[in-house]
Amino acid sequence: MNKNLNKSLLALAISGILSSHASAAITDIIISEYLEGSGDNKAIELTNTGTSNYTFPSNIELQYSSYNNQVRNPAGDNVLEGVTIPANSTLVIYNSGADIALSEAIASSATSVIAATYDEQSFNSLSFNGDDKVSLINTDTNTTYDIIGIDGTYWGSGQTLRRRFVEGNAIPTQSSIYKAADWEDFGEDVYDDLGTATYSEYQDVVASTCALDTQTTIAEVQGAGTSSPLITSGFTTAESYNVTGIVTAVTTYPEKGFYMQDVVPDGDELTSDGIFVSTANASDDMIGTTVCVTSTVTESYNLTQLETDEWDTVDATSSVPTATDIEIIAADGESFNATLERYEGMLVNLPEDIDANTSGNQDMRVSKTFGFNYDTFRNDMSLSFQRPNVNPTQDNVPGSDDALAAVAENNDYRLVVESSTRAADGEIPYYSSFSSDPANNYIRVDDSVIGMEGVITYSYSNFNLVVTNELYNNNFVHNTDRRSSPDLSTTTENGHFSITVGTKNVLNLFNSPYGGETNSHGENRGADDEAEYQKQLAKLVSAITGLDADIVGLMEIENNGFGNDSAIQAFVDAINEEYYDEDPKDEDSAVSTSNRYVFVGYDSNGDLVLDESDSLGSDAITTGLLYRPSKVSIESMSVISMPEQHAPVVVNSANTVMKDSSGAVLESGDNYQRETIAATFKVNNTGKTLTVAVNHFKSKGSTCWEEWDGVEFGDESTWSDDAPDEDLQGACENLRVAAAVQLGEELEDLGGDRIIVGDLNSYGQEDPLLVLTENITGKTITTARDTFIGDKPQFTVAGTPQEITKTYGYINTIALKDAEKGQSSWSYSYNDEIGSLDHILISTSLETRLIDAVDWHINAPESSLFDYNTEYKGDDYENFYVDDEYRSSDHDSAIMSLSYEYGEVGEGEPVYLTISSSAVDVPYVLEEGALIGDVAQIQLSSSTDMSDVVLPNVTITEDNQSLVEIEVYGLDAGNYTAKMTLIRDAEVMSEFTKTMSFEAASKDSTTTSVAPAEEYDGSGGGSFSIFGLISLLGLGFLRRYKAQ
Amino acid sequence: MLKKSTLCIALSTILAGATAQAATIYEKENGDNLKVYGEVGVGGHIGADYEYGEFYTDDKSYIDDSFATLGLKGEYEDIYYRLEVDYERENWAYGSGDLELTIDKLFIGYKFYKNHAIEVGLTDTALDDYDKYGDFTFDTTVETGEAGDQENTIKYEGSFSDFKMGLSYSYEGESSSGSELGDIINGYVGYFSDYVDVVIGAEARSGSEGISKYGGQKLFSLGLRAYITDDFAIGLNGYIENEDIAQTSTVISISNSFEKTSSYNNYQTLKNQGGLVSARYTLNKKVEFTGSLNYEEYEIWDINSTYGVSPDSEFSWGKERIWGTLGVNFKPTSSVIFALEGNFGEAAQDAYAYARVYF
């Protein structure tokens, strides 16, 4: 048996060697024909030029496009794997949706395989469209064996390209570099040679005929208008021109080619001296040389360009001219696009001052920091003239002419900054120190960009600057630089103190996958692994400690209950670890335990226990509320249910339910938004209360029923277009209006001093903000149809949209303070526009208390490269992570300060003082005139036992001291009346005498417990005497009918 | 003649707490007495519909309504008193469905002037005696939501010529399910004649101030009887009620038996109203026929009201209901009655059948 076995093994080994030897090599396989026809008519012919059969292993792939999409068969497998090409034969890979004529035309001698259609395998189908390279690749070694085409240039649309013999009529070999001259075009959908190992004739490269004596200058080609004056009809001139210029740049974006400028500029600032030459044959060694090009002139998507693969090098010793500063001239009018048009194709520099006729420096500002661009699917950056682009509805009424004008201005001011080659993840090709030391080389929205050089081109309806020089951090001037804490004033009058209220979006802080409680409402939206979670947590902790607010509203925290393993408990625990100094004398220290937070829990199931079975709403994320027990004490909490929409599903004219391109229902009519958590706090050391409501209104991203109202679907049942957004508020503004009404009404019922915080998903002038503040714009504001609070219709059973004329008078604190300071704040950056989605609104009763309100720009201006994620950041992703607050979320925090007076009484309520370490600090506010050496004394009266009370005398330590905190030891919880006097030279200074009623109570624990129930609100009868009841009998019908 | 008998019963109820039948334990020459009285009744609701919220269970189409009363009453000169216990089935919404023994009346009265008396204790509130005065039927018609029996009640009742009036005050009243209502005051004024009787009533309560869902309330009622002939009479009865009901509640404690105590807030006024037209025809001394047409409207039923039910939970009859009854009463003796009352329209049951013996 052993001998037999050994023989078998030997036979196998030998056969393996022999078969290996007999196999053709992959190097014998070439791309021999390319067919990009109408519809799904796509095919690639491979030819085995070797003398043996070749079978593709799994690591050899046919790929296409800049994303190197693997071409798969309809089942989703590598279309090549296991397929054998006989020696000197061909393999045709064709799209399964191709015309039957194509498949029938494939030579019977050929092998053919079917590749997937787009519907079957999306981007892994055979779906190149003429601007994608197609290559044969070894994925183990990342070796490109053979290639046709180039990405980003329409070199192969509607063409059937057959490979030519190489010089000497020899059979071509693999080439990793595409040369257009190696292929012959037979036109669209020419199938007659598919599957046959034939080649076109070898073609010598013909020398350029660029005649130097009949020249047209680039300035003449460009002209003074937006398109070339040489084009009299269509997009291309009928005749060719000889154009000579110095090559300033070779780029591959938006197409492969080079830029050149007139050797001698014409001096006319209305005409550009530069132009783009589209060619796949450009190479970097051309830069600085002077070349002569013979070409027709084309307007390619509004870019004036020449197109040729041949040129004469006129002067190889010339050099690149100095980049021209962009400068506004009077002829530009109000159009910055007109300015850029004058530089189209030129090598330019972004100077400190673009507009010499306006005082101050007008420069280019970062409007979208470096990151992914969903228009171009590339990493890039966007600039705007003299200021970042502001969302049109931040300062303008939605849908108004002013808003539309703002859109136009943003489009006009935009300059997209591109790199010649696609930026690798985590790298800015023209700013190498960014990725090597990002912490010191960050780029923020609103940075001025000075000294950036590049060529001006036009793509995707925007002017682009393809950068040509290397940049350093002095090229980016941070106008709104990083701050480790908000620039918020908390300065108060003597005898007053401040209470700060802030917002913090925690960008899906989920701990359920990492030891936290299970989330019963949805899947993880946060960190991908434990390491990412810890990074996320650390950044958020830094953001909260930096914010340093006494009350913080949270958005996007995981909705996994209020137990010990909940996300909000984990978050609070992590924050409180930063406050560790327990020494009472260090109470004012930044790390004092007095700064610790506690969260407000919601006993949703009414079992009087806060645990994992409680939750706030039914979304996977929810709102949250933190507070410092040292500053405020919770009086009660409530949850405000927000409107849901239950409208009909959207259908077409045949009553068929509309689907989107992925097959999902286009708009079900059922739309939800998160609940609002509201808590009423007692402001410690005063008798005042404060209600804070934390909100996260419906997002702008997904549609509601209203978005599709009026869209004519006809008999189409699939719809891939975006919903129209004529008023520029994004989707679901009507549902957010309904939310604003609900919030306004519910808080009106609660009464008192009220604060609305959170992400209202509404920019400054959008409808929900107008409802909550005031609507002096005259805009008609309407709710969504069919809105419900729980299962009750919000307005009417019919569900008719309601026109909202009532507004609630809240004050937009940051807008108010911005106006006073002459500045503009923002909290969010979307595409390349900034605006405020995160707000702090106060009831008018708080207006006189408002000290300051600001946005803390730690997130919106920052690149997402600085967040906790590790993906899409390249090999050096660790370089980007710092456990600081920057890019801890995508929204900036807003924060506001209010002023309260020590001992200030509320509406008949005693001053609320907390007992700490068996003592209460009774605030004694002194009028001006107290002198060093005066003694403050206190007397107390109460029905509470005061046998252990120690009443100290406190000596005044400075003249005109405004506040004495008299530490009374041994007070039990209860109500007291204090009489405080000032003694000078053994005599009572009666003008300083004050009395104050106060309630002493234990400070709230930093362990959350069920919030006290709201006290009886006095509605529904109340305390009637028997005589009151009798009068009710007689006067009952006179009483108003509804107690609203 | 019948109308006079009814009037006599009513008057005696007001003034002496007596009923038509009673066994005298003793009676002195000066009128002091002690009597025992009572009632045994068997029967119930046939084809009961749980949706109407009148019954404790959805599992039975027949809801037993058996009932027994045993009472003692007596007089010492101008002082009178009564102790009455009921053995009744808790068959109403949220009731247990069990037969329970309860003290129904426990009061002492004082006739301080001719036809004027005051009672103190657990007794009918004043309006309870006349809240359905215009209704000749037995049990299945519009109910007026007045306070009923209450503890801690002081009540005055008296008559002047053809007019009668009553007024009561109850300290910290309770609903039939034991929920706090706050202090309650109600009363009536009635005019009684050979041809027509009219009683108007009113009630107000202070509300529970956050202890139960019941807030303040005001109720006005009207009862009218018109005696067309000796054998035929028609009646009108109606009420309007504005009742404050809490819209929010928060659990504040849970007992060892897992019973929850809540605090209530955001009371909102809900309007309820109802009325009926009834008629009675006396065939002979033993047989009479009754009928009624009823209308009832509760705001909680109204899906268009902010405080009404949601559209998904709308009641089958909508925001108001209309139904009728037709009944026959057979009285083989003056102490026995067999009653059968059929319902049609939007009624809580198909029929109500009952036999009662008074002693």
Image (tube, coloured by chain):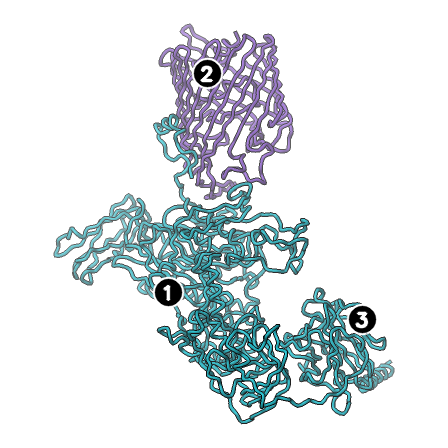
Chain colours: A cyan, B purple
Q: Residue A601 got which mark? A: none
What chain letter is assigned to the residue under label 1? A
The Cα atoms of the two marked residues, 3 and 2, are separated by: 99 Å
Name the mark nearer the viewer: 3 or 1.
3
- Outermost residue to the top: B29
Amino acid at circle 3: Ser
Q: Is residue A851 left or right of residue A248?
A: left
Q: Secondary structure at mark 2?
A: strand
Residue at coordinates 28% horizontally, 43% vertically from top-left?
A943
What chain letter is assigned to the residue under label 2? B
Write down the quadrant of residue A548 in the picture: bottom left
Q: Residue B198 got which mark? A: 2
Q: Answer with mark 3 or mark 1, whichever residue precedes in sequence.
A: 3
Task: Say which of A341 and B304 sits in front.
Answer: A341
Which image quarter holds the N terminus of chain A? bottom right
Write down the quadrant of residue A827 in the picture: bottom left
Judge the density around disc 1: few (<14), some (14-19), many (≥20) Cα neighbours within 10 Å.
few
Residue A539 image point, x, y percent: 47, 68
Residue A19 image point, x, y percent: 82, 84
The Cα atoms of the two marked residues, 3 and 1, are separated by: 66 Å
Q: Residue A823 got which mark? A: 1
Amino acid at circle 2: Val
Residue identifier under label 3: A103
Q: Eyeballing the image, is A821 above or below B90? A: below
